[in-house]
Amino acid sequence: MRSQGMDAQSDRLGRMPSLGSLAKISIGLILIAIVSSAFVYAETSTVNVNGVSYDVDYTGTGVTVSSITADADFISLIIEVDVTGSPGTLEITLDRNFFDSVYQGEDDDFIILVDGDEPEYSETNTSDQSRTLSISLPFGTEEIEIIGSQFGSSEDMPVEEEEVTQPEEEVTTPVEEEEVIQPEEEEVTIPTPIEKPVDEKPKTECGPGTILKDGVCILDERCGPGTILEDGECVAEPVTESEAVPQGLGKQLVIGVVAGFIIAGIVGLVLAIMSKASKSSK
């Protein structure tokens, strides 16, 4: 019985792998792990922005990246992924000359959306040349959007020159113009009007015995009453017809009245004598 137990134990020991075999298996597993890790950490994708190509390095654990594209209008990166881990992790390094998030000259946080939701992420490394983000992705994630503030610097980005359309010059065919003979214009002489002398009369005329002084007629006191100054001598003031007629009519009227009274007296006297004579004859 004892001999049979020893034989069985020796058979078990013979079936167990030797130390050399175990060492080889361990080395093989280590090599596989190194090779697989090398494939994981050496992923690079090329992104084109406005005609300029940039290389983006990333690491995926339980994550397969299908493509990385740039949206210049929204200043964002669109990453198509397939997440098989639960959760998966994507670690992406962004060159500042390619993509950055800056506000008033200082680093600002990136905005990250995973299928429209905000995931957990952290900035694991920051330098003057690049920024590294580590993003946690739930199982089944399909799209990651990273929003920044600028693509490259103003010096690196090409300036799109606006196409200036030059106006087409209108080509005109010269037309032979017929020579038109203009008639000679006759010189017309316009006679110069002759100005007639105008006798300037004083605007205001004064009557006899008055003189004009400062625009007002006043009595001429240089001669006595009834006289006026004429040619430097005082002469009798002439009598106008309108003044002579009333004086003649007055004299005739007086003479007629006196003659009437005389005739009336004579007639009365004759009548009285005749009356006395007729009474005495009776």
Image (tube, rainbow, N blue to C red):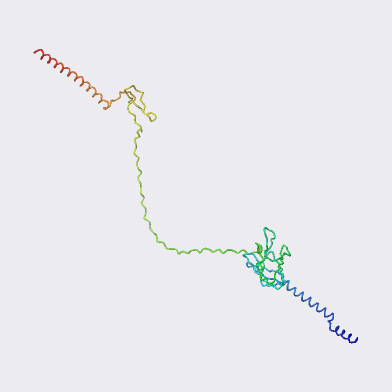
Q: Quadrant of residue 97?
A: bottom right
Answer above or below: position of 176 versus 241: below
Extreme residue toward the top, this view: 280
Q: Residue 73: horizontal and vertical position, in percent?
A: 62, 65
Q: Residue 132: horizontal and vertical position, in percent?
A: 72, 65
Answer above or below: position of 208 versus 71: above
Quadrant assignment for the C terminus: top left
How many numbered markers are drawn? Answer: 0
Quadrant assignment for the N terminus: bottom right
Q: Quadrant of residue 204?
A: top left
Decide which of 25, 139 is in the foreground and name it: 139
Judge left or right: residue 171 versus residue 202: right
Decide which of 244, 208 is in the foreground and name it: 244
Q: Quadrant of residue 247?
A: top left
Extreme residue toward the front, this view: 1
Extreme residue toward the right, this view: 2
Q: Residue 182: horizontal and vertical position, in percent?
A: 38, 56
Q: Residue 78: horizontal and vertical position, in percent?
A: 65, 68
Judge left or right: residue 31 versus residue 102: right
